[in-house]
Image: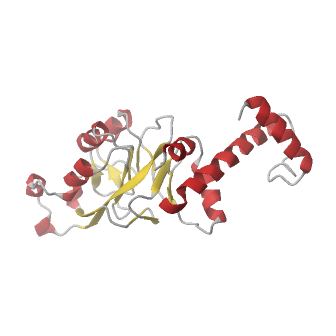
Amino acid sequence: MKQETREKLMDVSVATLATALYKRGLRSQVIQGVNPVGWKGKNMVGPAYTLRYMPAREDRNQLVEFRNPEHPQRVAIEQCPKGHVLVMDSRKSATAASAGDILITRLMVRGGAGVVTDGGFRDAAVIAELDIPAYHNRPSSPTNLTTNEAIGINEPIGCGDAPVFPGDIIVGDADCVIVIPQDIADDIADEAFEMTVYEDFVVDRVKDGVSIIGLYPRTMDEHATDFDAWRKAKGR
């Protein structure tokens, strides 16, 4: 992704992005049921690299599987490109962990931009202290082998009811995570950046006692003039 696009997406909210996507008819891009594991104070932004789990079958999912150097969970951690977000389809099930602190630490050291699962993490308190954004449903201790089998790497998945294709742009803030189709990411970033500047102006005006009628959304010309002056004064 373009560095300019990444920088713009670092400073916008998922809510604003959801509105920009809604204008284009995209209504199901927010990954449902995931929350930050310790908010890092800045957005998570990066292209998606995916891992898909399926229901585990007992004869295929014994602890010995972790000795396999080609185990998809381990391979995904080792292959996720620098600057990408590892997104895991864990079937919206937190009955078993999608990963733990050792694997997420490895992802962090390799330069991963973040990690998302619609399941849960074990060692969540440790992951919360790592220098990598992480999002999950809830803490979960049992190994993923208990109910899930890692089966597909970097293929289209569903995560928290949102469609995720490899290379789609993932943005997470203090609330949740959204998926931006790769081919419109630059335009969405530009629009969301402009929306954010105007919304900051609106907040200033509302704090000053101005009515939202005609201001948000802007339907009165006087607010356009005030906004231009405010933006010039703020250098934005």
Q: Position of residue 114 (x, y in %)?
A: 39, 45
226 on left or right of 46? right
Q: Position of residue 162 (x, y in %)?
A: 47, 64
For this rendering, which residue is in front, 26 or 4? 4
Residue at point 21%, 67% (across, down): 56
Looking at the image, what colour scheme do you see? secondary structure
Quadrant (top left/top right/bottom left/bottom right) for the C terminus: top right
Please give the count of numbered marks on the rendered protein.
0
* Residue 225 at least partly seen: yes
From this view, report whether residue 105 is shown above or below residue 85. above
126 on left or right of 180? left
Residue at point 13%, 67% (across, down): 60
Residue at point 62%, 50% (across, down): 190
Q: Position of residue 206 (x, y in %)?
A: 81, 39
Q: Position of residue 2 (x, y in %)?
A: 49, 48
Residue at point 47%, 38% (across, down): 39
* Residue 143 at least partly seen: no
From this view, report whether residue 93 is shown above or below residue 84. below
Occupied quadrant, residue 154: bottom left
From this view, report whether residue 25 is shown above or below residue 176. below
For this rendering, which residue is in front, 175 or 51? 51
